[in-house]
Image (cartoon, rainbow, N blue to C red):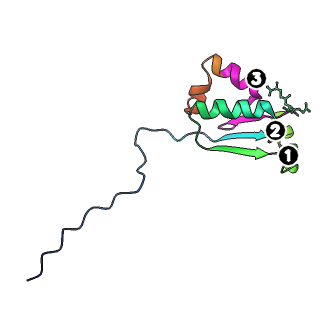
Amino acid sequence: MPAAAPPPQPRTPAEPMPMNEAPKPAVRMYATATCPYCIRAKALLLERGVTQLDEIRVDLQPALRAQMIERSGRRTVPQIFIGGVHVGGCDDLVELDRRGGLAPLLAGDGG
Ligand SMILES: N[C@@H](CCC(=O)N[C@@H](CS)C(=O)NCC(=O)O)C(=O)O
């Protein structure tokens, strides 16, 4: 007599979404490959837990430099947007972090 088949197990999603976690705002950075301010800004964002950085390389996609200038009113890289909010360049990002404003913005609680 063959052994009885094990009872079916309930299916669980591969990565269940935690119920109490707000969705993270999109983080977009217009950048070039060699700009030290871009490297510094990216390092700080990663240090603060950003795992999905939408990095727009304006040196590779020059047409998007015009978009950056139009959206930010600035010509230098980097230009950083968090959840659609224009943070500014690297110095602005560092200053925002120093004032304690970066973490809430990254958490989707920027006011
Ligand atoms: N204070 C700015 C400085 C940014 C900056 O000077 N970026 C350089 C590249 S490393 C740049 O875009 N230079 C082009 C220009 O000045 O038009 C910041 O912190 O983001």
Q: State the residue position of label 1.
A: 59
Disc 3 residue lies near ligand 1 with CB under 8 A: yes
Q: Residues within 10 Å of mark 1 (few under 14, many from 20)?
A: some
Q: Do the residues labelled 3 and 1 touch (CB within 8 Å)?
A: no
Residue 43 locus on image (x, y percent):
66, 32
Q: Is mark 1 on a helix, strand or loop?
A: loop
On screen, residue 82 versus residue 5, left or right, reads right
Furthest-top residue in view?
99
Is residue 78 on the magenta stretch?
yes
On screen, residue 85 versus residue 31, left or right, reads left
- Cα gap from disc 3 to disc 2, whole angstroms: 17 Å
Residue 51 locus on image (x, y percent):
58, 41
Say which of marks 3 and 2 sits in front.
2
Amino acid type, callout 1:
Asp
- Cα gap from disc 2 to disc 1, whole angstroms: 10 Å
Q: Quadrant of the C terminus?
A: top right
- The image quadrant that residue 77 belongs to is top right
Furthest-bottom residue in view?
1
Looking at the image, is mark 3 or mark 1 earlier in the sequence? 1
Q: State the residue position of label 3.
A: 91
